[in-house]
Image (cartoon, rainbow, N blue to C red):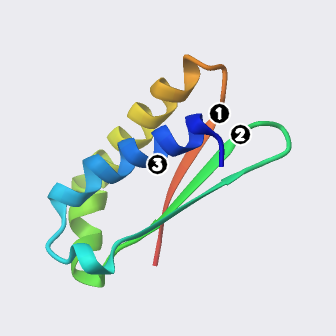
């Protein structure tokens, strides 16, 4: 995993962990595609999913925006997904 990918994962983790009640159930993975894009996938406890998504998806959208802005400095594309 490249340093840029680790930085993006660290950023997403730093944002999500204070929001959730069950940090032991939090899992995060990142995969780099051949075209240089990064897919960040995270799993949280069922009870925490609503907190990460937020009202009308505002929090997850904000997390995606921050991750994309951080990656844009390096010319990379990032997708952040919350898996169930």
Per the image, label 2 sits on a secondary structure element best described as: loop
Q: Quick check: 63 above or below 19?
A: above
Marks 1 and 2 sit apart, C-alpha to C-alpha, by 5 Å
Depth check: give the residue in front, 2 or 61: 2
- Location of residue 57 with respect to 72 vertically, above or below: below
Q: Earlier in the sequence, mark 1 or mark 3?
A: 3
Which residue occupies the extreme right position in the image?
34
Tag 3 secondary structure:
helix
The answer to which image quadrant residue 3 occupies is top right
Instruction: Locate residue 67: give its quadrant.
Output: top left
Q: Residue at x 34, y 72 (%)?
A: 26
Q: Which residue is mark 3?
A: 9
Q: In the rendered structure, are the residues bearing label 1 and label 3 in contact, judged by CB atoms less than 8 Å apart?
A: no
| Residue closest to the eye, 70 or 10 | 10
Vertical order, 60 against 52 (above or below): above
Which residue is under mark 2? 37
The span from disc 3 to disc 2 (Cα, nearest Å) is 13 Å
Judged from this view, the residue extending furthest toward the top is 73
User: Which mark identifies residue 77?
Assistant: 1
Would you say the residues marked 1 and 2 are in contact, meaning their CB atoms lie under 8 Å apart? yes
Question: Could you classify mark 1 by the number of other residues whose Cα lies within 10 Å: few (under 14), some (14-19), or many (20 or more)?
Answer: some
Judge from the rendering whether residue 69 lies leftward or rightward of residue 26; answer left or right. Answer: right
Label 3 crowd (10 A; few <14 / some 14-19 / many >=20): many
């Amino acid at each position: 995993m490249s340093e840029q990918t680790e930085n993006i994962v660290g950023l997403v983790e730093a944002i999500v962990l204070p929001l959730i009640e069950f940090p032991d159930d939090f899992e995060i993975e990142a995969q780099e595609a051949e075209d240089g894009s990064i897919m960040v996938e995270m799993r949280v406890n069922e009870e925490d999913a609503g907190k990460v998504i937020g009202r009308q998806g505002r929090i997850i959208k904000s997390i995606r925006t921050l991750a994309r802005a951080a990656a844009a400095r390096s010319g990379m594309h990032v997708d952040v997904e919350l898996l169930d």
